[in-house]
Amino acid sequence: MKVYLKEIRLRNNLTQAELAEKTGCTKQTISRIENRLFIASIALSLKIAKVLGADIEDFYKLDTKELNSLKVKKEKIRL
């Protein structure tokens, strides 16, 4: 999974600390999300998206391999 949170945060001229304060989490949490060390809960993801004026889909994207894997699994289920 690709994480574009840092790019979107920087476009909004926010530091990790500022985003953390606005979303009620810690700077370390934001850093860990940006570095793919932590996957935010849906609730936190929604808060981040709201602060950044974005959709969750804007900062989490599945890569091609992951998407193809999902298609294969879906096809196996239909059999």
Image (cartoon, rainbow, N blue to C red):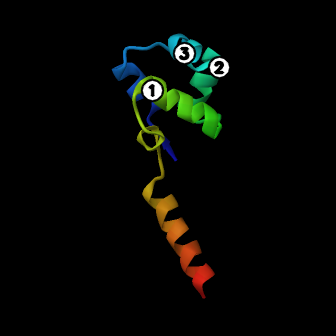
Q: Residue at x 51, y 11 (%)?
A: 18
Which residue lies at the image location 58% right of the left edge and 20% below the top edge? 23
Q: Quadrant of residue 11?
A: top left
Q: What is the C-alpha distance between the residues marked 2 and 3? A: 8 Å
Residue 39, placed above or below residue 67:
above
Tag 3 or tag 1, which sits nearer the N-term?
Answer: 1
What residue sits right under mark 2 in the picture?
25
Residue 43 visible (yes or no): yes
For marks 1 and 2, give the CA distance.
Answer: 16 Å
Say left or right for 8 vs 47.
left
Residue extending farthest bottom: 79
Judging from the image, what secondary structure is the residue with disc 1 in? helix
Q: Residues within 10 Å of mark 1 (few under 14, many from 20)?
A: some
SS for tag 2? loop
Q: Nearer the viewer, mark 1 or mark 3?
A: 3
Give percent across and percent down for residue 46.
54, 34
Instruction: Residue at 45% x, 44% y: name it.
Output: 57
Cα–Cα gap, marks 1 and 3: 15 Å
Q: Confirm or deny contact between disc 1 and disc 3 (CB under 8 A).
A: no
Query: Which quadrant of the view contains residue 44?
Result: top right
Badge 3 is on which residue?
Answer: 22
Which residue matches tag 1? 6
Look at label 1 and name its amino acid.
Lys
Q: Is residue 39 visible?
A: no
